[in-house]
Structure formats: C-alpha cells, structure tokens
Amino acid sequence: MEQEKIDFYKGLAIYILPEGVTNYFDVVDFNEQPAKDHGKLYKTELHIYLDEKDNRPEGFDGVKSNGFGEERMIYDFPVRNRKTILHVRRRRWLTADGKSVSFPLEEAAKIVCEGTSYSKELALFLKRADGQ
C-alpha cells in the first residue's frame, strides 16, 4: 500500500515539475507558505524540495557520498495560483584523494536557464511573452 502511494505522488510530480526532473532528482518534501511579497499577484508559495539522485557516471564507483551542496532556489511556473519555488540540492562526492566534487548534469537534467534563477520553460515563456 505504501509503495502505491509513493508511485502515485511520483506520477503526479512528473506533470507538475519541469520535464525530466524526476529522472535526476527525488522530491523529498513540499509545503505551502504565505507569499513573502505581500500584496502581489500570489498570496501563497508552493515550495518543492529536490535532492539529486545517486546518478554517478560509470567508472566512479570508488567515490563516497559526501552529502549535498548548498541549496539553489529556482522559480518555476505557478501551480494552481501559487508561486512555485524549487529548492534543489546537488549531491557532493568525496574522491579517493579527499576532494569534494559534484558530477556535471546531463543536458536533460539541467533545470535552470543559464544566467537566471528561472526554470528553462518559464524563462522561454517570459521571453516569448516579451515579444523576443
């Protein structure tokens, strides 16, 4: 029964999150909070917390997990009239010589539009809405 509930939520997340995110990140939490910018368009914010999965490239079996790096906030499309903020944590790894590293994400896993704090889809939408 518990596994069915997990699969249900994962299936729902596929439709809410940017394309491909659930292939590389696990949804570890979510909550709704009053909007920090009171009087604006949205009264509440949906916060979704994502941790990078163990997607080590082949040949890196010798590295050890070293927790997660600093959280990055990414602004995505509103969900049901709630400002949506993704909190993304990338996995850190410890090499045999003691260096802390994180592996580059495949292009499909890159959520953010380079140079912004917006999801790729939202940035493209805003660019088109501005006539560019």
Image: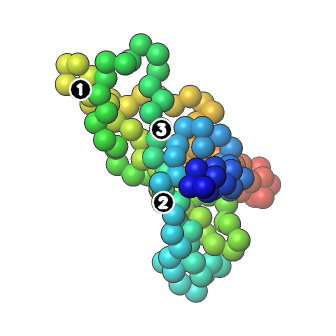
Q: Which residue is mark 3?
A: 53
* Crowd tier of the residue under label 3, counting other residues whose Cα lies within 10 Å: few below 14, some 14–19, many 20 or above: some
Residue 3 versus residue 43: which sits nearer the camera? 3
Q: CA distance from mark 1 to mark 3?
A: 20 Å
- Residue 5: quadrant of the picture: bottom right
Q: Residue at x 57, y 78 (%)?
A: 44
On the image, the x and y values in percent for residue 116 come to 54, 50
Q: Dividing the image into 4 quarters, which one contains the N terminus?
A: bottom right
Give the farthest residue toward the left: 98
Residue 6 shows in the view:
no
Q: Secondary structure at mark 1?
A: loop
Q: Give residue 92's position: percent from left, percent from top.
A: 34, 36
Residue at point 71%, 71% (across, down) = 80
Q: CA distance from mark 1 to mark 2?
A: 29 Å
Name the residue beneath numbered marker 1: 99
Q: Is residue 32 above or below residue 39?
A: above
Residue 117: mark in rendering:
none
Q: Earlier in the sequence, mark 1 or mark 3?
A: 3
Mark 3 to mark 2 CA distance (whole Å) = 14 Å
Q: Answer few, some or many: residues within 10 Å of disc 2's Cα (few below 14, many 20 plus, some between 14 and 19).
A: few
Residue 108, percent from left and from top: 63, 33
What's the colour scheme?
A: rainbow
Amino acid at the residue labelled 3: Lys
Residue at image mark 2? 29
Task: Name which of mark 1 and mark 2 comes first in the sequence.
Answer: 2
Q: Position of residue 33 (x, y in %)?
A: 50, 76
Look at discs 1 and 3 and give the one toward the viewer: 3
Seen in the picture, residue 34 relative to 95 is either above or below; the reply is below
Q: Amino acid at mark 1?
A: Lys
